[in-house]
Image (tube, rainbow, N blue to C red):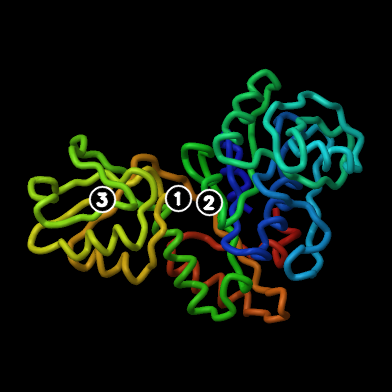
Amino acid sequence: MPFVGEILKHRSVSIVGLAKNAGKTECLNYIIKRLPLDYFNVAVTSIGIDGETTDQVTGTAKPEITVREGMFFATSEKHFRQKRPLSELYEVSEEDTALGRVVTAKALQEGKVLLSGPSSATALKRWMQSLGGFGIDLILIDGALSRLSTASPAVSEAMVLSTGAAFSANVKDLVGKTAFVVELIGLPLYVGPEPKLHVSSFSSLDAAMLKGHPVVEVDGALTDRLLMAAKNVLGEDELELVVGDFTKVFCSQELYRAFVRRGGRLSVRMKSTLLAVCVNPVAPNGIVLDSDILCRELSEKIGLPVYDIVKNEYEV
């Protein structure tokens, strides 16, 4: 698929699922399988735990992560000891997790691994910086909806989004929810003068405070509480809120639409690059959506190609 070639143009790419069992691991394996490792050095890790054979919540079977010969991978000490492929140890980090320190190794043969790498975005960035001497061309980061910080442009240059029936069992609802996330990823960069007014998620906004401040910087998260306050003080004047990046937006789609209808705008300091959207039409409870309809309607809604990884497993 074309997006695998696009991945090679970036130094770091996050694969983020919008829900558990949305097909994120299948997507990661698909990418790994098609990378040109004969001339490309790749490292992979996860900010959570991935590669388990059984989902700890639903009890359903999960695809394991396969690393290829020559790939670097980072995982916890506990899971490194459980690895199956023969590997060469490169580094034991001082970054500690609940499962021990983070170990970086190089696979000397193909095999399946459990990935449980750095446990925070800050620790992840430190680990990425530590790879400087290993000649790494591309870092793949396994992420999740609950930790969208891995997809922040402050961490990774680009991202692949995975969604599916586990996120919503209704095609229309799934398309709408996924399209909203894609819309946030595409928020415009702020290019105006430096805002003089800064607020936080706990700030209270009123008309008097905003007088003379058409642009307001949001330090930290943009919550429903703050966005509601901003919406309520909007009148004839427009208001632009500036956030760090799309991962800092924690507001409902309905409230965001109401804010925009009143003349509000939202922009970001750093913009993410979305390379592809992949779908898994099968949910753990047995619900199966029509893959062709889902891909077509979502693609039309977001204006980007949408891929069913499993259905197109043999496509290049």
Report whether 276 appears left or right of 1: left
The answer to which of 170 and 6 lies nearer the viewer is 170
Query: Which residue is painted at 60% across and 64% down in the image?
Result: 19
The reply to whether callout 2 and callout 1 are in contact (CB within 8 Å) is yes
The answer to which of 312 and 68 lies nearer the viewer is 68
- How many C-alpha atoms fall within 10 Å of the one at disc 2: few (<14), some, or many (≥20)? some
- How many C-alpha atoms fall within 10 Å of the one at disc 1: few (<14), some, or many (≥20)? many
- Give whichever of discs 1 and 3 has the lower sequence position: 3
- Give whichever of discs 2 and 3 has the lower sequence position: 2
Report whether 188 appears left or right of 273: left
In the image, residue 135 above or below residue 164: above
What whole-number distance in Å separates the C-alpha atoms at marks 1 and 3? Answer: 14 Å
The reply to whether callout 1 and callout 3 are in contact (CB within 8 Å) is no
- Give whichever of discs 2 and 1 has the lower sequence position: 2
Residue on which disc 1 sits: 247
Residue on which disc 3 sits: 241
- How many C-alpha atoms fall within 10 Å of the one at disc 3: few (<14), some, or many (≥20)? many
In the image, residue 285 above or below residue 93: below
Numbered mark located on residue 148 in the image:
2
Secondary-structure class at tag 2: helix
Give the x, y percent position of residue 52. Answer: 80, 55
Secondary-structure class at tag 1: helix
Q: Amino acid at mark 3?
A: Leu
Q: Amino acid at mark 1?
A: Thr
The answer to which of 231 and 13 lies nearer the viewer is 231
Secondary-structure class at tag 3: strand
Query: Which residue is painted at 49% across and 77% down in the image?
Result: 173
